[in-house]
């Protein structure tokens, strides 16, 4: 698929994002929603965990980079500064989600050392989650819990280690990736959401799930986190084992997702109440574009890129993009946060909007 036929549609995503984000920062200045309820950003619903505060700043940076507008630059800097204290937050496993879309992007744009220092501290804080017994970064939920999601956050730890020459910290990151690969990625490339370990011995006990259907099923967003995360870690380390895992996840994703490119919340759930989890599709599109670059020159590369472009064509069409719907405050419709808890089901979700915009940016700007 050529970019030309969908270029106008992807430009339309940015136009839609400008409108929706203008309204959000005007109406709720300094606030960080996670999901909508009935299409309105919901500030009173349960958060479950505080992991989304980098996605608003991340979208504002993308708007600035796309449009060159000083207004979006000022907003991006403002919303990035608001989360700076989180660089020392040991209560969540999500410091990559907070600081990669914001401070890392800001540093890459300016080369300002004081910005790099914030990114490094966030990565070092992630290192404090490492459990020697078991060899993993523990989830926010419990000491004995490893989440597949952490594959999207271990990159900032590895980056911090590489920037500071801290071999011990890098080793923790690599061990986390190998543990995740061994226990949460299955032979067919599907993934479990969570792994549970024996705290006394570090022995792996079982697979589990929080947001998927069952312990032995495949939660689509978790697999998308793995696809993108293992690819990112390969990009940082050059370790071919991680590329192999990212590609196994990509194969599973491509083989099991309907033609339009949008999976359900969990591929194994019989008769799911909702057919789509759009945020998983947006993350997978970004991860596949990244994988296409990492495998450039191989036959698979064009399959990854084609799949990503088809997915973005679907997501930027009227069924998913909330353009021309002034009553809907998010950008991308039909996402799911936490189906079991009934949070953000068939709604817009902050990370869905962010990764959608990021994937469109990758296509439009060839990054
Ligand atoms: N990291 C939490 C989620 O993907 O919902």
Image: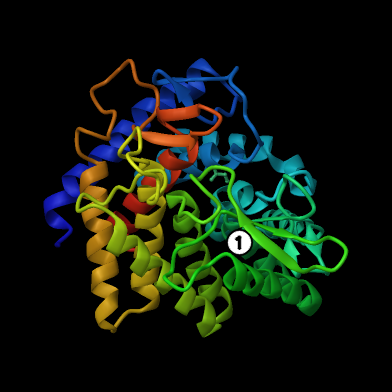
Residue at x 39%, y 22% (from the top left corner): 329
Q: In this orientation, which residue lies closer to the viewer: 113 or 92? A: 92
Q: Residue 294 appears in which quarter of the rendering? A: bottom left
The secondary element bearing badge 1 is classed as loop
Residue at x 80%, y 68% (from the top left corner): 202
Q: Residue furthest front?
A: 270
Q: Residue furthest left?
A: 5
Displayed-image quarter of ligand 1:
top right
* Image position, residue 236 (x, y; %): 56, 74
Name the side, left or right, on which 134 lies relative to 318. Answer: right
Name the side, left or right, on which 166 lies relative to 109. Answer: right
Residue at x 26%, y 28% (from the top left corner): 323
Q: Residue 253 appears in which quarter of the rendering? A: bottom left
Q: In this orientation, which residue lies closer to the viewer: 268 or 361? A: 268
Callout count: 1
Q: Quadrant of the C terminus?
A: bottom left
Residue at x 32%, y 39% (from the top left corner): 271
* Image position, residue 188 (x, y; %): 42, 71
* Image position, residue 336 (x, y; %): 44, 36
> Which residue carries the number 1 mark?
111
How dense is the environment of label 1, judged by Cα within 10 Å: few (below 14), some, or many (20 and up)?
few
* Image position, residue 307 (x, y; %): 25, 61
Q: Quadrant of the N terminus?
A: bottom left
């Amino acid at each position: 698929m050529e970019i030309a036929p969908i270029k106008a549609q992807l430009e339309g995503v940015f136009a839609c994002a400008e409108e929706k984000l203008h309204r959000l920062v005007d109406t709720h200045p300094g606030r960080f929603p996670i999901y909508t309820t009935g299409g309105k950003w919901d500030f009173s619903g349960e958060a479950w965990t505080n992991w989304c505060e980098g996605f608003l700043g991340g979208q504002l940076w993308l708007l600035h980079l796309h449009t060159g507008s000083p207004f979006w630059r000022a907003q991006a800097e403002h919303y990035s500064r608001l989360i700076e204290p989180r660089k020392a937050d040991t209560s969540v496993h999500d410091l990559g989600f907070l600081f990669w879309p914001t401070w890392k992007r800001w540093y890459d744009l300016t080369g300002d050392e004081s910005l790099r220092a914030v990114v490094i501290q966030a990565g070092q804080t992630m290192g404090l989650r490492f459990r020697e017994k078991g060899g993993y970064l523990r989830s926010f939920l419990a000491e004995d819990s490893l989440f597949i999601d952490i594959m999207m956050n271990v990159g900032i730890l590895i980056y911090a280690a590489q920037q500071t020459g801290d071999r011990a910290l890098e080793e923790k990151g690599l061990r986390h990736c190998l543990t995740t690969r061994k226990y949460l990625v299955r032979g067919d490339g599907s993934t479990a959401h969570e792994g549970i370990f024996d705290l006394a011995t570090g022995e792996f006990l079982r697979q589990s799930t929080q947001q998927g259907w069952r312990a032995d099923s495949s939660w689509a967003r978790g697999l998308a986190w793995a696809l993108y995360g293992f690819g990112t870690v390969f990009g940082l380390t050059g370790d071919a084992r991680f590329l192999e895992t990212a590609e196994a996840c990509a194969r599973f994703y491509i083989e099991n997702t309907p033609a339009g490119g949008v999976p359900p919340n969990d591929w194994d759930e019989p008769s799911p109440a909702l057919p789509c989890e759009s945020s998983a599709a947006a993350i997978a599109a970004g991860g596949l574009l990244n994988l296409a670059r990492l495998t450039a020159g191989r036959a698979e590369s064009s399959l990854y890129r084609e799949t990503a472009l088809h997915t973005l064509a679907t997501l930027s069409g009227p069924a998913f993009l909330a353009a021309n719907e002034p009553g809907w405050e998010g950008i991308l419709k039909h996402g799911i946060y936490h189906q079991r808890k009934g949070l953000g089901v068939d709604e817009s979700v902050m990370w869905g909007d962010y990764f959608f915009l990021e994937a469109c940016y990758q296509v439009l700007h060839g990054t």
